[in-house]
Image: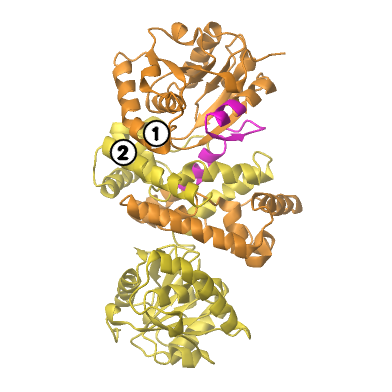
Chain colours: A yellow, B orange
Amino acid sequence: MWQPSIAPGAVDRIACVGAGVIGGGWVAHFLARGHRVTAWDPAPDAEERLRRIVGAAWPALESLGLAEGASPDRLTVAATLEEAVADAEFVQESAPENLELKSDLLARIDAAAPIGVVVGSSTSGYRMTDMQAAAAHPERLVVGHPFNPPYLVPLVEVVGGERTDRAAVEWAAEFYTLTGKRVVLMDREVTGFIANRLQEALWREALHMIAEGEATVAQIETAVTAGPGLRWPFHGPSTTFHLAGGEGGIAHALDHFGVDGPWTRLDSPPLTDELRKALVTGAAEVTGGRPAAELIAERDRRLIAVLRALREAGA
Amino acid sequence: MWQPSIAPGAVDRIACVGAGVIGGGWVAHFLARGHRVTAWDPAPDAEERLRRIVGAAWPALESLGLAEGASPDRLTVAATLEEAVADAEFVQESAPENLELKSDLLARIDAAAPIGVVVGSSTSGYRMTDMQAAAAHPERLVVGHPFNPPYLVPLVEVVGGERTDRAAVEWAAEFYTLTGKRVVLMDREVTGFIANRLQEALWREALHMIAEGEATVAQIETAVTAGPGLRWPFHGPSTTFHLAGGEGGIAHALDHFGVDGPWTRLDSPPLTDELRKALVTGAAEVTGGRPAAELIAERDRRLIAVLRALREAGA
């Protein structure tokens, strides 16, 4: 059984392998939370580019509030991958999205990093089961999928592969949470995880509409940003549907609107009793069972806050 | 040829037919913009409910800024539909989503409202061609589809039916815009219009994931609101994909990621030269052809504004 060598809250030294847009974003995030970061990237101009990414992100991070002692000076760029991870207490891998490349890199990280250290991969879609095959200690390899830019968007999707120890998955979830991230801890491996699948479905309906001449790129951008996009920073699809049902909530909305109207090219699954129950109990859980009037008042306060913020930010 | 009896900017008196959640939201919106509104709804407690909706929305509308002279006292509730629309300069219909009911109601409105007056329907999915069949003057019947709540979410999708005069569609687009709405003027009738199709595709991928046990309602809510949902108030899917391509923009992203990965159940259309061109020129149009670094800095400013606003609103 695998055991972590350090508690999530005691981590100081983090290694970031791969320092492009995502890896560089992670570096900025961890530095802002006060960590020491050692980065490695094979590109000849990696250090210069990385310091530019961190420098560009820093004013934003300062304005949101830095951890005590946080400084871009706590960044070191290592000459080799092995050097970067040798005394790391956590490793984040953010290589380009290529299965063979990522498998090889994870095996190299695994060979060089202390055994009790968790390694998170930024992959945006591969299953850890497919990436961990070549590693000697696959039990501490975990997906920790961020969203762009990782120093501002809080979401991290955390999931293990078939050979990952559950303790490593839980360690990673706790660690990311302690650095200020919002973690979705997945119990099952799904290609693309959750958020990318959802935004990909939306993108594909958009692609069909553009391909068929039903809508233009500009119309779709406005339809999202002036419409449902304004609610998505605080209400996901179930809460939206729950409120569409008024006092009757999602149960009424399901009866009234159904889920299989001619509104998109993606067919709906059948609305079985089981799915219906999952939706109704899920909506009650995420809304805390509060009455519609209270949820509506809260939605309006948040909408106004978002509208005002965008106005002030010149959008 | 149909001709409007009044310029969009000269409208004072508006009739709202149907005063539920959406109709009541329109009433609140028009009152806040300084209009006189006459409403009608067949429910016995319609007036009481409507005044409650307006009263609940008013503090939000005040905080965003009212038009000169705007007052809830400018609302009258009429005893009959015919009385409500008799001297209206614009009519908004917001009846329940039932094709026969809406067709009948639009025919009655059409029979009672002056011929030069535009009638907008709040339908969330029906084509005007299917709703205008029973009307004597179908040329001034237009879809003006709002988003909930209509007094806060700016988007209105405007489209005519086969028998709608183009002048009426353009009049409606200008009128809604003058009342502070963001209009998407559609050239083609598509069931569900644009924004509902996009959010419906996302919702169905979510339903499949819940049905298959791949994700829970709560995980999906967090995946949206802590992830891509934070960007959707200012970046639609094309802009997001454009930025994912770095300096190479959407052209590079299309080459690098493609559009047909195994990330959702909805198949992609083929990436033809024509679609590719529409995406590349569309992204250039919506981003004004500005360089990636500038777009990224702007995105970060807006993200921070949204994150701060939500924090202050207690989200």
The amino acid on which the numbered mark 2 sits, given as a three-letter code, is Ala
- Residue drawn at x 39%, y 91% as measured from the top left: A87
Q: Secondary structure at mark 2?
A: helix
Does B103 sit above or below residue A93?
above
Q: Secondary structure at mark 1?
A: helix
Question: What x and y, as percent, mark residue A167?
Answer: 29, 76
Please tell me whether residue B195 belongs to the stretch shown in magenta: yes
Q: Quadrant of the N terminus of chain B?
A: top right
Residue B242 visible in the current orientation: yes
Question: What x and y, as percent, mark residue A171?
Answer: 31, 75
Does A42 sit above or below residue A27?
below
Which quadrant holds residue A2? bottom left
Q: Which residues are magenta?
A: B174-203
Outermost residue toward the front in this view: B68
**Labels in figure, total:** 2
Residue under pointer 1? B61
Q: Chain of mark 2?
A: A
